[in-house]
Image (cartoon, rainbow, N blue to C red):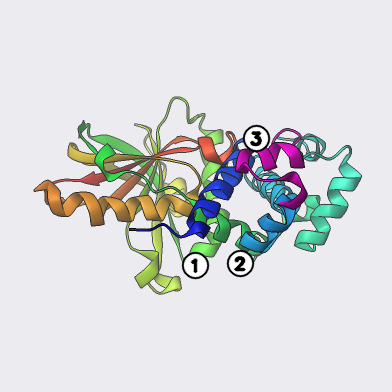
Amino acid sequence: MTTCPNDHLQTRFARVIAHIDAHADRQLDLPELAGIAAFSPFHFHRQFAALFGITATRYIRLVRMRRAAHSLLFRKDIPITEIAFDAGYENAESFSRAFRKLHDQSPSDFRSHPDWDNWQAPYAKLQQIRRNTMTGTESDNVTIIEFPETRTACMDHIGSPARIGETIQRFIAWRKIHHLHPSKHATFNILWCNPEDTPADEFRMGLAVATDQVLSEEENKKGFYCETLPAGRYAKLRHIGNDQTLRDSALALYRDWLPHSGETPGDFPLIFQRIAFYPDVAEHEAITDILLPLA
């Protein structure tokens, strides 16, 4: 079987994408990236643009700006000036101009009044490139674990998946008030339905934190309820990387592992346990354990 020459090229430039994602927090120059691809610096930038539809410089800026946007939305204790420096800008003013050009909002307006339906639209090209260059999670990395019964406080996001960030904001604020830090209280997502075959207004995902705290009637009115994750045998597949490829890892569990495992899924939804969070860590370092309950 012959291999298309373009496959080798895609593989070499996929290494560049992975390198940028891993090192976007420091200076990256053309010779370094060309070296990763084993490609002439005189032609690297044109070949990158030909393969991915944007320049390497543009890709780097999008990676940095997306992390900045996440920090503005979900890490409200971090000052905008610090976010600007982390994104590679020398001052808040230059960061604000670049951010407004991308989002049509200043960083402060975006932080206080985000357009939840469209805020990820500027990063569609970034997500497409990552999906096309990802290396799949190996289904033979699945392990069977004994999962303990775990009481949680849960808040459901119901409605368009595009607006889940709004619910995440409320969830983060509530757990901060109750001192339920992720380092001591595990974080879970409960996938009550599949977003790909569920109408947007009926989509439901649970955001849960492990705790034995008793919820008040007032907290129930705010949408929090107690949900116990059942004890038992679970198939665990560890996903390392961004959420854009998390769905593909979950699919691999059903497509590649389950049919040959001799196992049957149990009577509880799929669970994501969030181990390391973006933007607290770089996207390539984010860790999510995919947990499939077994009968």
Magenta run includes residue 77 = no
Horizontal and vertical percent for residue 170?
55, 48
Residue at numbered disc 3: 23
SS class of the residue under badge 1? loop
Relative to 278, say whether 104 is above or below. Answer: below
Query: Between disc 3 and disc 1, whose residue precedes?
Result: 3
| Amino acid type of the residue that numbered disc 1 sits on in the rendered structure | Ser
Image check: 208 left or right of 51?
left
Residue 160, labelled with which disc? Answer: 1
Most foreground residue, 146 or 177: 146
The N terminus: image quadrant: bottom left
Horizontal and vertical percent for residue 137?
36, 45
Q: Which residue is drawn at 52% across and 29% down?
A: 179
Q: Which residue is drawn at 77% across and 36% down?
A: 79
Q: Report, in whole angstroms, how far the alpha carbon at label 2 lies from the one at label 3.
A: 29 Å
Q: Which one is closest to the eye, mark 2 or mark 3?
A: 3
Relative to 168, say whether 197 is above or below. Answer: below
Horizontal and vertical percent for residue 67?
66, 44
Magenta run includes residue 25 = yes
Query: Between disc 1 and disc 2, whose residue precedes?
Result: 2
Most foreground residue, 206 or 239: 239
Could you tell me if the residues under marks 1 and 2 are in contact, i.e. CB atoms within 8 Å? Answer: yes
| Magenta stretch bounds | 24-43
Image check: 13 left or right of 58?
left
Visible residue check, residue 35: yes
Q: Residue at x 32, y 56 (%)?
A: 251
Q: Which residue is drawn at 36% across and 50% down?
A: 249
Relative to 200, say whether 61 is above or below. Answer: above
| Amino acid type of the residue that numbered disc 3 sits on in the rendered structure | His
| Amino acid type of the residue that numbered disc 2 sits on in the rendered structure | Asp
SS class of the residue under badge 3? helix
